[in-house]
Amino acid sequence: MRFTSEQRLDDGVLEREFTLGEIPGILWTPASAPAPLILMGHPGGLRRMRPRLVARALQSAEFGFAAAAIELPGGGDRPASAAAEGARADLRRALEAGEPVGAEVVDRLVLPLVDKAVPEWQAALDALLSLPGIGGPAGYSGGVISIGIRLAVVEPRISAAVLFAGSFVPRTMFEEARRVTIPLHVLLQWDDEGNDRQAALDLFDAFGSREKTLHANLGGHTGVPRFAGDAAVRFLARHLS
């Protein structure tokens, strides 16, 4: 891990950009240390997502958490995948035509992403937890929800997760969801035009966790209210403190 820039944000939060091999990332650490770590998932494009990620990181810092995000495979300036671009184009065509999105399209788009992104998140976790001022346990918060599911199954250092129900989920991920046992807090925007609400409810039902909470709010994909974000961070504080 190599840090490439740093600046101070509100309340003394230190923001540092880094690279991990060829993977760009951003780390936010509060003034208090050591700080438990939240891995912040997102749909890709760190520069595009940065304002929302900064807001989430500052919100997390209020509760004493460090937060980190890395660029997804094929996102931002990382090399694009022709297969993923083809699947994304098929997805857009179906949505624009008002047609159901086929399972084969979802599989082509999401499963290779999960297979590549999860080992990268684990490598980032290795590097981040070795830094002074960063301590375990760790949590995951955000999307792509299939990435969060896989991490919850295979990564024992993640003790709790906040999952954003706002992306298409391959049917095979429902089987993995049954193997999830860590505490979960699932955020669902009820009027998310790009999300299959019933599929999100079915996925929540499939999770094997004994402690799982569904927090649903009216509004579209980017309309998660501030109080819902606060509730999600408080959930992590209960399990990571």
Image (cartoon, rainbow, N blue to C red):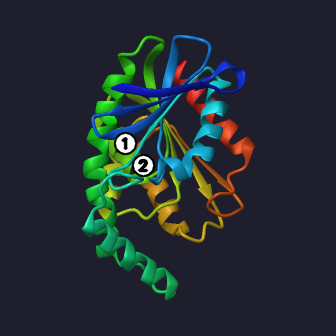
Q: Position of residue 180 (x, y in %)?
A: 37, 42
Q: Where is residue 62, by image quadrant?
A: top right
Q: Viewer-proximal residue, 60 or 164?
A: 60
Q: Is any atom of residue 230 visible in this view?
A: yes
Direction front: furthest residue: 4
Q: Residue at x 39, y 23 (%)?
A: 128
Of the 4 image quadrants, the one containing the N terminus is top left
Q: Considering the image in quadrants, where does the C terminus appear?
A: top right
134 relative to 124, above or below: above
Q: Which residue is mark 2?
A: 207
**Considering only vertical position in the picture, is 54 above or below 100?**
above
Residue 167: horizontal and vertical position, in percent? 47, 61
Can residue 155 be spotted in the picture? no
Chain-order first, disc 2 or disc 1: 1
Residue found at x 39% / y 39%? 24
Q: Amino acid at mark 1?
A: Val
Q: Which residue is mark 1?
A: 180
Q: Which mark is residue 81?
A: none
Neighbour tally class for label 2: few under 14, some 14-19, many 20 plus, Cα within 10 Å? many
- In the rendered image of this protein, does residue 158 appear above or below residue 187? above
Element at label 2: loop
Amino acid at circle 2: Phe
Q: Do callouts 2 and 1 mark residues in contact (Cβ within 8 Å)? A: yes
User: Local crowd at mark 1 within 10 Å, few (<14), some, or many (≥20)?
Assistant: many
